[in-house]
């Protein structure tokens, strides 16, 4: 049994390495000369091979060994990194995955495929197959561009304004402030040039500054700050944290060394003054006090940064099976429920001490809940990376040139949401590639660059996350969509649609605008799946499109599925919860207002007509409604809809419980929750309810005529 | 399928009353018996779906057995109880459900010789709901096939709002 556990640890690690391998390969495709990337690919394969052999995955080890051999040559420059090599290595990566899947009980890996890949790789080796021999020299010729490591860098910026800078109305403080906003900064004023007070001309600038700035921005951005004072100010920007300064084993630089490097003194001055350094240097008049101070700060800064780097290396992560986390979330959910009970009880008992304790527990519970939820949060970046491969392969297949850019990869989402987001995103991106972005020929004809663009972005917005897929393709044609829908009998011929409503048609089952069915799309299932999965995640879909310019599909998703903020309402003696995220306001509905509306279910809210649904009637709840009812106005599918209830009780921390199989047809409820007194309240799915009512009314109207 | 799984072993049963008749369920299916508590009705579901209750933090659906068997509804009494059962679905998934009964009686042992196949007619119950009919002290005991009665196909028929 213990062997079982061990191999699962290996496969888990191997899958991770494979996805890392894929990322590196795709990056390598963009900058084929990058030695560091080649090294990363090589290391990933080497580890897979090594641990594969250790855990008895001989097939994996053998196959990987072949690939590794070829890549080793790429590493020492014998062969060059060509598109062919990358294609083959990507195929090899898929093959390794297939072998692993087979070992895990999947269908057996295709042996011929493996032979073909190995043959192809061997063909790239100069001695064996020839062919690529010429490429080697070319690769070497390309040289290795120094790669500036991503992440914040420290710069030293020397700012020396000319004496007459004030004459033009320039305030250097504003410039310094601008620098300060770019990141973490330290500013040292060099005041050595200040004359005695008698000789001081208040309209002249005697000061200069040294700024130590740690920022994500690059040197150009820093230079841009001084763009308007270019000829009134001497500016010198230098990157401080070269790799050698930060590598943890190197000794921190000595003050003297720094001064020499900065050009403030030369080596001789340094040696002369070396023993009791600081003061002597000043006394000798070689450097000013301020320069020493600046140099000291510089030294400190580099040291601090090194410490930070050390810390980041030390901060490790723990791998935990996700079902353990699920258990934890369940427990926290129960704690929240019990806490609500404690709150209610302590309020009714009226004991002051008990209330204090209850409040303390409430605070702790809220913190515990937030913490637990944050453990489940994952950055969406890994999902984004998967799509890079998809875009690459698909565009090759379809003969289109497409670049994919991403933004907000660090945006965090609940793990379950991310897991369930994969399929819908795949469908949307496939759709964009196939239907959205045109062929290079058509693009050039339309005056667009040959290469199409797909932009994936994720951003937080309140309690939701917005994920958008934008392409610069041909856009959606609302008229065409409408015609198609009428042709297929989905819509009656005389229907009136706004553009927005027309766009929503693409999410209908069996609706496809493709003229012919391709391997990629056209069967009219894809976008239908998107709608279903996003509904299941309680998300919303928004489509924006401009004919000829492109389409943007935005998914609005809740941050988490387990606990939501809800609005507790009462009808007769039944309690319901409405998701608070959708609620906009509550207004009163009196009987005479209903009477004046001539049986129509609409209300005038600040000169806007808002339709409403009477939940009491809808659910057939018996009994008389109160004199004044409440309408909870919510935004559903971009429209304002009211829901009539007897009483609004208030905000409620809602732990969502599944209603289970027996109620899976009760689509108007997305789940249930347990209230403070132990009874169960149902959570309404407003979106489904509105669609239901729309559907029913449409049928009634057409049936009545 | 009805009565297809012949009972070949001596098994313990929990008996309960519905409209003065004795019914029984295999005890291995039963998790616990609760007093009647407040049930939250789920709108737009069949009459026999009582609603859902809070069972120590999880939401459990409850079926009114009288209404399910087309018997007349009755007032709740002190004896009214909810029998919590574990249902095994065709796909092997286990769910927990509650069955509302007039009262629970006892746990008894029945040998295969005491059990007969369910008659095709005359029981006023659908024969596929029964696993057999037991005889005990000159009384008939309806042995229920609880997995069948509580299968999603049986329960999830939606009814339009009244």
Image: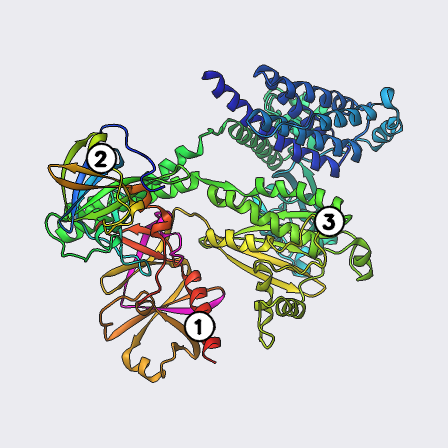
Q: Please name the residue that numbered disc 2 is placed on.
A: B115
| Residue A14 screen position, x and y as percent | 58, 26
Q: Secondary structure at mark 1?
A: helix
Is residue A230 visible in the rendered image? The answer is yes
Residues at marks 2 and 1 on the same chain: no
Is residue A364 visible in the rendered image? The answer is no
In depth, the one of B55 and A270 nearer the eye is: B55
Residue at screen point 77% across, 32% down: A33
Q: Please name the residue that numbered disc 3 is placed on.
A: A402
Residues at marks 3 and 1 on the same chain: yes
- Number of marks present in the image shown: 3
Of marks 3 and 1, the one in the foreground: 1
Q: Secondary structure at mark 2?
A: strand
In depth, the one of A123 and A190 nearer the eye is: A123
Q: Which mark is residue A697?
A: 1
| Residue B40 screen position, x and y as percent | 25, 55
The residues tagged by marks 3 and 1 sit, at their Cα atoms, a distance apart of 45 Å
Residue at screen point 71% across, 43% down: A392
The residues tagged by marks 2 and 1 sit, at their Cα atoms, a distance apart of 54 Å
In depth, the one of A651 and A437 nearer the eye is: A437
Q: Of callouts 3 and 1, which one flags the residue occurring earlier in the amino acid sequence? A: 3
In depth, the one of A372 and A143 nearer the eye is: A372
Q: Which mark is residue B49?
A: none
Residue A198 is covered by the magenta coloring: no
Residue A630 located left or right of residue A290: left
For the record, the magenta segment spans A638-667
Q: Quadrant of the rendered structure where residue A439 is?
A: bottom right
Structural crowding at the residue carrying mark 1, measured as other residues with C-alpha within 10 Å and reported as few (<14), some (14–19) or many (≥20)? few
- Chain letter of mark 1 equals A
């Amino acid at each position: 049994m213990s062997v079982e556990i061990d191999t699962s640890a290996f496969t888990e690690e191997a899958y991770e390495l494979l996805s890392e391998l894929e990322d590196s390969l795709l990056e390598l495709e963009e900058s084929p000369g990058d030695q560091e990337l080649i090294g990363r690919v090589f290391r990933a394969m080497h580890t897979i091979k090594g641990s594969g052999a250790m855990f008895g995955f001989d097939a994996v080890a053998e196959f990987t060994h072949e690939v590794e051999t070829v890549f080793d040559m790429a590493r020492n420059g014998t062969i060059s990194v060509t598109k062919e090599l990358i294609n083959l290595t990507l195929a090899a990566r898929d093959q390794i995955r297939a072998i692993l899947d087979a070992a895990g009980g999947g269908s057996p890996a295709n042996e011929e495929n493996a032979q073909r890949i190995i043959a192809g790789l061997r063909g790239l080796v100069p001695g064996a197959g020839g062919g690529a021999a010429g490429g080697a020299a070319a690769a070497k010729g390309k040289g290795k561009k120094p790669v500036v490591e991503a992440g914040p860098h420290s710069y030293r910026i020397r700012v020396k304004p000319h004496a007459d800078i004030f004459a033009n109305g320039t305030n250097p403080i504003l410039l310094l402030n601008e620098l300060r906003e770019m990141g973490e900064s330290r500013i040292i004023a060099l005041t050595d040039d200040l004359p005695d007070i008698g000789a001081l001309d208040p309209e002249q600038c005697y000061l200069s500054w040294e700024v130590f700035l740690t920022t994500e921005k690059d040197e150009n951005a820093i230079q841009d700050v001084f763009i308007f004072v270019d000829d009134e100010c001497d500016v010198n920007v230098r990157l401080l944290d070269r790799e050698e300064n930060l590598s943890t084993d190197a000794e921190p630089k000595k003050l003297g060394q720094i001064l020499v490097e900065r050009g403030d003194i030369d080596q001789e001055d340094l040696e002369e003054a070396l023993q009791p350094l600081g003061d002597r240097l000043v006394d000798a008049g070689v450097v000013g006090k301020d320069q020493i101070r600046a140099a000291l700060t510089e030294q400190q800064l580099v040291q601090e940064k090194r410490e930070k780097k050390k810390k980041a290396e030390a901060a490790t992560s723990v791998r935990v099976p996700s079902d353990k986390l699920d258990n934890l979330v369940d427990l926290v959910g129960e704690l929240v429920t019990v806490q609500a009970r404690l709150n209610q009880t302590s309020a009714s008992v009226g004991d002051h001490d008990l209330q204090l304790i209850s409040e303390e527990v409430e605070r702790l519970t809220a913190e515990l809940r937030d913490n637990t939820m944050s453990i489940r949060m994952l950055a969406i970046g890994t999902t984004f990376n998967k799509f890079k491969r998809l875009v690459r392969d698909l565009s090759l297949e379809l003969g289109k040139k497409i670049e994919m850019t991403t933004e907000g990869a660090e945006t965090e989402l609940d793990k379950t949401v991310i897991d369930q987001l994969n399929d819908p995103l795949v469908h949307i991106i496939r759709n964009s590639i196939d239907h959205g972005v045109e062929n290079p020929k058509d693009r050039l004809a339309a005056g667009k660059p040959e290469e199409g663009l797909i932009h994936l972005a994720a951003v937080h917005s309140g309690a939701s996350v917005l994920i958008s897929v934008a392409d610069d393709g041909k856009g959606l044609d609302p008229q065409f969509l409408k015609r198609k829908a009428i042709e297929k009998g989905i819509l009656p011929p005389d229907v009136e649609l706004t553009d927005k409503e027309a766009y929503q048609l693409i999410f209908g089952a069996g609706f496809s605008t493709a003229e012919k069915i391709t391997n990629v799309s056209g069967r009219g299932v894809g976008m239908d799946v998107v709608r279903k999965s996003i509904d299941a995640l309680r998300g919303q879909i928004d489509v924006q499109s401009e004919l000829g310019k492109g389409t943007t599909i935005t998914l609005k998703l809740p941050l988490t599925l387990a606990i939501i903020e809800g609005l507790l309402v009462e009808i007769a003696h039944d309690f319901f919860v409405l998701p608070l995220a959708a609620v906009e306001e509550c207004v009163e509905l009196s009987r005479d207002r209903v009477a004046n509306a001539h049986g129509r279910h609409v209300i005038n809210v600040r000169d806007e007509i808002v339709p409403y649904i009477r939940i009491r009637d809808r659910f057939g709840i018996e009994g008389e409604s109160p004199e004044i009812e409440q309408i909870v106005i919510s935004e559903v599918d971009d429209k304002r809809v009211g829901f009539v209830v007897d009483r609004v009780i208030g905000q409620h921390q809602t732990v969502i419980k599944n209603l289970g199989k027996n109620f899976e047809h009760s689509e108007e409820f997305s789940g249930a929750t347990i209230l403070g007194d132990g009874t169960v309240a149902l959570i309404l799915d407003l979106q489904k309810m509105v669609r239901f009512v729309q559907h029913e009314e449409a049928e009634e109207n057409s049936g009545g005529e | 399928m009805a009565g297809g799984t012949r009972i070949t072993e001596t098994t313990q049963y929990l008996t309960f009353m519905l409209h003065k008749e004795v019914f029984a369920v295999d005890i291995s299916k039963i998790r616990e018996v609760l007093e009647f508590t407040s049930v939250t009705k789920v709108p737009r579901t069949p009459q026999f779906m009582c609603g859902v209750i809070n069972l120590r933090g999880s939401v459990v659906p409850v079926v009114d057995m009288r209404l399910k068997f087309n018997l007349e509804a009755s007032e709740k009494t002190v004896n009214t109880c909810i029998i919590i059962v574990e249902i095994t679905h065709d796909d092997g998934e286990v769910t927990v459900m509650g069955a509302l009964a007039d009262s629970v009686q006892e746990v008894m042992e029945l040998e295969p010789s005491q059990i007969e196949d369910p008659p095709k007619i005359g029981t006023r119950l659908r024969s596929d709901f029964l696993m057999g009919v037991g005889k005990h002290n000159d009384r008939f005991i309806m042995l229920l096939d609880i997995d069948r009665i509580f299968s999603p196909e049986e329960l999830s028929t939606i009814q339009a709002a009244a």
